[in-house]
Amino acid sequence: MKETITLKTTYVVDFDGTITSRDITSELAARYGGNAYIEIENSYRRREMPIQIWLQRIVKIFSVDLELLLEKALEWAEIRPGFDKFLESACESGRAVIIASDGLGFYIEPILEKYGLEKQISFIYRNETYINKSGKLEVRNPHAHRICTVCGNCKAAHVVKLKEEGRSVIYIGDGSNDRFGASWSDHICARDELAESCREHSLIYSQWTNFYDIIKVESPELSDRTNSSLCCPLGRGVKT
Ligand SMILES: [Mg+2]
């Protein structure tokens, strides 16, 4: 008789525009980046600039300090409906919740703490924004791919690592750059630009509006996404 092993499902969740209803990194950049922001943003939209470079250039043009940026982030952050109930449901079913963010990242823990949500998160993969020795803002990408520069945080690598541990992954996101991590997952919950991207790349997804929709998603089977995935986190990164 074939033995069946029960595998725990893990959620990999984007932060900006997913857990929060607004993309705080983009809003800070638009508010405090001045005219230079428009130029950087247009270049990014034309896909001439990867997100790693976008982040590095954005922190250089901020007209204010980190303290004010954090104050604004806390003020603007709204948690998407159902996120607290989703965390409770994940906890009850023994499913870990991991955040993977490719934004400025410094405000994630403070926002979760503000709403009393930090204890239910298993791990946070995020970029680090800090003041360097010369007193200037700088961003570091500790979870970037070694060669590929498309993403600042290689979410696909986190998804692949979880699957190697035998967990099936439900990916939840909203942005076009989520497509790489999502393409490796076993079930994609997509909205906005990620949903558009899934359609463009023929990736099956379920549309979501708020976290009550995510609670209803059943544990997927662990599946091989080698052929349909959009990048190779264990290889050279993005597929050409
Ligand atoms: Mg997002």
Image (tube, helix red, strand yellow):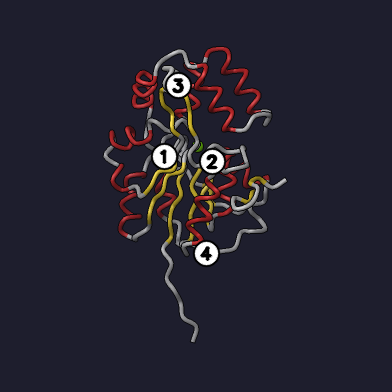
Q: Which residue is mark 3?
A: 137
Q: Is residue 192 left or right of residue 199?
A: left
Give the Cα separation between the discs numbered 4 and 1: 25 Å
- Which circle marks residue 222 in the picture? 4
* Between discs 4 and 2, the one toward the N terminus: 2
Give the Cα separation between the discs numbered 3 and 1: 25 Å
Q: In x, y percent, where is residue 27? A: 47, 24
Crowd rating for badge 4 (residues with CA inside 10 Å; few <14, some 14–19, many 20+): some
Q: Are marks 3 and 2 in contact (CB under 8 Å)?
A: no
Give the Cα separation between the discs numbered 1 and 2: 22 Å
* Between discs 3 and 2, the one toward the N terminus: 3
Q: Which residue is mark 1?
A: 19
**Mark 3 secondary-structure assignment:** strand
Mark 4 vs mark 2, foreground winner is: 2
Query: The disc labelled 4 sits on which kind of residue?
Result: Leu
Q: Is residue 146 left or right of residue 99?
A: right
Query: The disc labelled 1 sits on which kind of residue?
Result: Ile
Q: Which residue is mark 2?
A: 144
Q: Are marks 3 and 1 in contact (CB under 8 Å)?
A: no
Q: In x, y percent, where is residue 129? A: 43, 28
**Mark 4 secondary-structure assignment:** loop
* Between discs 4 and 1, the one toward the N terminus: 1
